[in-house]
Amino acid sequence: MSSQPRCPHCRHFLYLDALACPNCGADLGFHMLSRQFYGLRNNQVVIEDRTWYTCSNRSWACNWLVRDDAPAGRCFSCRLTRTRPAANDTVALQKLAGTEEAKRRLVLQLASLGLPIVGWDVQPGGLGFDLLSSLTDGRPVMIGHANGIITIDLAESLDDRREALRVRLGEPYRTILGHLRHEVGHYYQNVLLTDDEDWARCRALFGDERASYRDAIKRHYALGAPEHWHDSFISEYATMHPWEDFAETFAHYLHITGTLQTAAAIGIRLDAAVTSLRDVDVIPRESYEDQPIQSLLTDWEWMSQGFNRINRAMGFGDLYPFRLVEPVRRKLAFMHDIITKAPLTYEQQLAIAAPWDGERA
Ligand SMILES: [Zn+2]
Ligand SMILES: [Zn+2]
Ligand SMILES: [Zn+2]
């Protein structure tokens, strides 16, 4: 099944954040279980004999559907948000809409990779999001992860602010989605590494995460990354501490699989005659779950060059301004291993995460 979202009425192409069809104007809601859009009547739709409603955050641009018995009428993604700006803080709430959109994309990807998503309100240490604004609160908001809760500074959704930070920190890439993918990597390190053998393999690749984090921060901000960091790390930030290397690599696994999934869904492929160094077409897959890591990395090597050229054609910087050197490839292979080890079905995911969304009536 292609996950290419289409209008149920006129089959027109839709972006994931569509609230209405740009072609026929139909009101639409996104149904996470089937990964499809449904047409709405009076903000509801019947799917398999069960009534689904629009999420109570629809006025803040959430287009997901909730089943009739969902608590507070919040969708699966919105329920993961533990803290958000006050209801009267409309400026911050507008920034929240963009961040929530990135978060829905993240949640959808985690689900399609078969990763367990257990919410903070279901289990202590479960996944949750504190979406705060340093502008409103007048005090700094540290982007980070602690005990399942990911904190994001909504002020980073302001382009000028985020871009200034990106330049100051010398980063080639900085987006809200990138932050989310990195922080969720911290969460999954503890969820996916379940035994001593996993941790031993992890330490052999990323280093010993029991090293002092406080010392690592001090060293990183005083001295910067070591000179030849390119030879073994995906980014300067990854050099700071083994935890950060893991989270950075996890984020890249999501960047790569997410972008290839989109390319596959819209049918982008590279003709062998064009790439010329290969005798077969490069055909991205929606899922690499049953593929060896080499197939993922080879497809990405070619597709990312294609995407970079498209970006350059519009005067932008490279879509993927990173180089995957051999040690980083080995780290990505480890990610591939632990992520594809025991994928859950959609029903299993939702049954543990949101029982009221997950059971089929
Ligand atoms: Zn339509
Ligand atoms: Zn929602
Ligand atoms: Zn981090």
Image: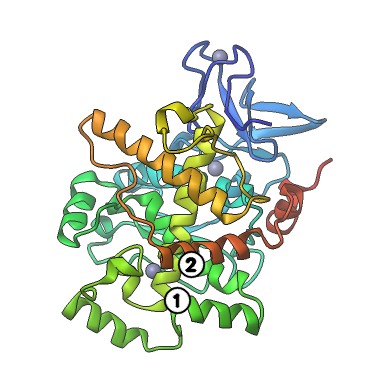
Q: Reading the chain from its start, which is encountered first: label 2 or label 1?
A: 1
Given residues 102 and 235, the one toward you in this image is: 235
Q: Which residue is mark 2?
A: 331
Q: Which mark is residue 239?
A: none
Residue 173 placement (x, y as % from top left): 29, 52
Q: Position of residue 105 (x, y in %)?
A: 50, 44
Q: Residues within 10 Å of mark 2 (few under 14, many from 20)?
A: many
Q: Residue under circle 1? A: 206
Disc 1 residue crowd, few under 14, some 14–19, many 20+, Cα 10 Å: many
Q: Position of residue 84 (x, y in %)?
A: 42, 55
Compared across the picture, whether 6 is left or right of 229 comes to right
Foreground pick, 106 / 359: 106
- The answer to whether mark 2 and mark 1 are in CB contact below 8 A is yes
Quadrant of residue 307 in the image? top left
Residue drawn 75% across the image and 30% down it:
47
Name the amino acid type tagged 1: Phe
Residue at the image position 45 percent from the left and 83 percent from the top: 209
Vertical order, 45 against 127 (above or below) = above
User: How did the renderer colour the structure?
Assistant: rainbow
Q: Amino acid at mark 2?
A: Lys
Tally of numbered discs = 2
Q: Is residue 141 left or right of residue 299?
A: left
Ligand 3: quadrant of the figure: bottom left
Q: Residue at x 17, y 79 (%)?
A: 223
Q: Secondary structure at mark 1?
A: helix
